[in-house]
Amino acid sequence: MSTTIIKTNSLHKSFKENHVLNGLEMQIEAGQVVGLLGTNGSGKTTLIKCLLGLLKPTAGECSVFGECSWDLSASAKSRLGYVSQEFALLPWMTVEGMADYTGAFYERWDYAFVKTLIKEWKLKATERVGVLSVGQRQKLAVILALGHHPELLILDEPVASLDPVARRQFLQSLIEFTEHEENTILFSTHITSDLERVASHVVFLQDGKVDFTGELDELKQQVKRIRISSENNLPSNLRVPGTLRSEVNGKFALLAVKGFHNGSLEAISEQHQATVNVEDLNLEEIFLELSGVSTQLDAEVAK
Amino acid sequence: MKNRTWHILKTYWKRPLILLLLIPLVTSFIALVLLGEGESRVQIAMRPHERGRVHHVFTELLPSEAEKNTSLETIPMLLKRMSAKQVQSLNMVCLHVGDPLPDLSVLPNLQYLRIHGFKFTQENIDHLCALPLLDALVIEQWELPPGALAQLGQKVSELEVLGLSLDKHQAELSHMTKVKLLAVNPLNASPDLIQHIAQLPNIETLTLVEPGPIVRSKNEHWQIIELSQKEINTLTAHPKLKEIYANWSERNPQYHLQLDALLPLRALPTSFSQNRLIAINLTVVASFVIFAIVALQLWAHLISPSAAVVPNYLQPHRNVGLGILIVGLLTYFLLLLRYGFALLPTLCIVLYFPSVCCLYSIALNSKNKVFATILIPLLFASFLLSAMFSSVLFELYASSCIWFFRNNLPVFTALVLLIEIVCIAGALNKLPLVTVLVNENSVFAPAYSFWDVERAQKRQMEQAVNSWLYRRMDAETKTLRYRGDSTLQMVSLWRSGNMFRARSLLGFIALMILFGLLIHLFRVWFLEEELFAQDLRWMNGLFSAPISIGIALPALIWWQRRNSMEAEFMRPVNRPNLIKQLHLALVIDHGIVLLGALAISGMLAYEGQRTLPELLCLMALDCVAGPLWMVGVNMSVFVCKESWKAVALMIGLYMFAFILVMLTAIADEELIESNLQSLIVLVVATVFAILAALGLNLMMHKAALRREWG
């Protein structure tokens, strides 16, 4: 039986008049690697901060390890690892000093593991944190979040400043992190290829609400692109249930559909005497379709 | 162009921090306009110096008097309390007419003696002259035996005769060979008094004591003394005379004289307007604020990427900054001129803090280590100089200060002015370079730019990484290990994440004390003052330095860490414990304040002018209520997310405390008549202050618990 690690219930968060989260419902089980997707301003960081108790929800509830996020106990926090978007560290400390300093807060800190990661990720132990480049500092922030082998790792855009090699190393460490232990990861990112590589589940946020939550494969199964070609002109209002975007050009049409099933295809094929091809989408394309960005881009091109 | 200037100006009032800085600026402006000369004056005339604590003793008490006034003490009672050798200064009062002068030979270390109400005999004079160490004498007698003045004048170097008519003793004056400081009340002397005094062979300082209003009204014909050219010549020709203190003021003057006629003698007033000192302090604060506003804004503009890419970007910003600086400083310059200071010294005062800040900026960023090292003591000296304008310390340096205010030290004034102008011009000229250097290199002052928050401060650390301080702190982090649930260990752990440690300021304070001692040694050496058992008010000034550090520095220490606190909030500590540990860490950071407060309490006890309950109350205020209030105020940094809100809260809370203290002091001064009532007010105020400080801490703690760290 799976254990619920993160749960939100009708979560609202507003900053004055700006309603960022609007009744968000989400549940993450142990062992899941969840990618948090959404456009800028969709509420990803606010959600993460509410989950960690860094922000107080305006209404609703959120819990981590079954504890109210706002009042997380020390033991709950000791099972948590977090890398913030800003990954602000103490600039005067050396890399090694920063690791020792962070480790002193934890009862179970794996000094050898941290040392190995520092070496593998090519950080100089004696160098000041303030002297490190942005990418190097981000690496260190990730290492420090892993040092106590947390059961839940929350990362807010952890790879934004990393080069491809470091990103690959980071993803590898995430895979190892979940392979060896029954650990859970929630991470937000805009680099969907990385997410595709490691995530088992996806949560898609739009306007402060969950637009989709489920397994990555399920999402890929649900969102498809349908290419239709007919001998006659197709109606400009051609739609199937769950159409996200429709582009009709004479005898040709292109539909992006969520909640795809074969039954609707057969109906189109018969009704319009058309050939219908179904195409799989990669996560980035799904992201664009779900967020409506593709529609906007099309509209701009049409102008 | 106009449009551009207008846009630059608009950026000034769009910043909350600058709007906050306008509050003290406007307040000081209004205060300077409304203040005026006022009645309150600081007495600065040189009188015989007291050595250590002055013990007040009376002649024999009647049994009924002893019962009613338990605080009245006789010499035998005093000697029961303390060793005779400890008594260095004594105020001896004759309680009943005809009481004989007690035997003072039992006090072998007596150096300062004030005698009041006795009828002296030749035997008494011989007795006083036989006291081995007696060197300062204040006599409030109307009569002395013939030859007594000459005899005393060969015994002591500091002599004050207040009630005595000197007419009868004119011939004796020239025999007072040892007297260096003479204070007399001219109301009892003939107009040619000055001529006679000028015959004292070793006199260096003459004080013509200003009579009180009652004495003045009874002796109206003596109010104005004309000094003839002959008398002036006699005075100025005296080889050793340096200073004459008298009521030279234009209002209700005692002497009609162009003071410059006495040059090179220093003709100094007996008192100085307290409001003029306040005006100087207000101007210094205002000039600092104006400079801070301009510097902050210029800095923000010049370190922005636009400064590097937009053509002709720097010039208009610098011009606007310079314009604001000039207009602001000129306004305060004109306001200060109203208080009767000479033109150039006023300019020196107005430019004082801006130039110190420039000097600091130059020293901080100088690549020439020798230059930077030389500038550091100069900076310390500058800060010590600012303490001189407090009413307590001013008395110690009044002579030189007033001489400076009157522009009678033109070379010194010109030199100071030149240094100030060079510093400001140099800093303004190099401002773009300085801001870039600060932005890139300084580990103490991260960029203020609001356009460039994300910019990496990579080079910030590069110059500082090899300093001994960093190496020491590295060693500390290597020994850090998990210590379980011990609150104190956790507090220590949190604090070890701070780059700035309160204890590293001990070195700064040690330097302050070193400079204070150097100044004191200078006074001992050149002014021939005592090394110990002296007026120790200057030490109060020194020890108040750690207290002033505590006003904002601990908060600044944690403010520096605000960016990393979001991630650090996720350390395995629950919210209540986290706030408790941070609160305690802040308390420990204020330890340096406690050091200063304890030292000042020690000084208060040493002065011995207060009763035990008074002393205990003052110590409680000084060592408990004050530091606790500071901790409570500085908790703002854990309560408020935005810096400007924290600063506003801190200013508001300090203003609130200041107003309460002032109201209590005014109520005590105006409404309270007896000592007992005054003591009750003090006790109540102390208890209230401690409770208020505790309450503030509690409130801030609760508010910090509600803070969102993300």
Image (spheres, grey):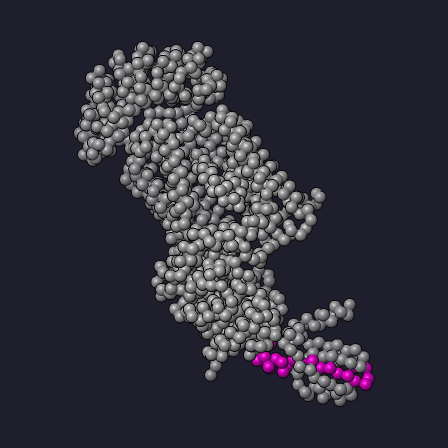
Q: Position of residue A151 (x, y in %)?
A: 46, 74
Q: Position of residue B583 (x, y in %)?
A: 41, 56
Q: Which residues are magenta?
A: A211-234
Say if A71 sits above or below B230 in the image: below
Q: Is residue A165 visible?
A: yes
> Residue A231 lies in magenta, yes or no?
yes
Judge from the rendering whether residue B633 lies leftward or rightward of residue B335; answer left or right: left
Q: Residue at x 39, y 30 (%)?
A: B396
Please tell me which residue lies in front, B244 or A169: A169
Q: Residue at x 58, y 65 (%)?
A: A161
Q: Position of residue B333 (x, y in %)?
A: 56, 32
Say if B491 sits above or below A257 in the image: above
Q: Is residue B56 visible?
A: no
Circle count: 0
Q: Position of residue A1 (x, y in %)?
A: 47, 83
Please tell me which residue lies in front, B704 or B161: B161
- Work out which residue is located at the far right of the displayed protein and give it: A232
Say if B448 sits above or below B607 in the image: below
In the picture, the quarter occupied by the N terminus of chain B is: top right
Judge from the rendering whether residue B672 lies leftward or rightward of residue B230; answer left or right: left
Q: Residue at x 77, y 86 (%)?
A: A274
Say if B74 sits above or below A184 in the image: above
Q: Residue at x 54, y 39 (%)?
A: B354
**On the image, which quarter does residue A280 sit in?**
bottom right
> Residue A44 lies in magenta, yes or no?
no
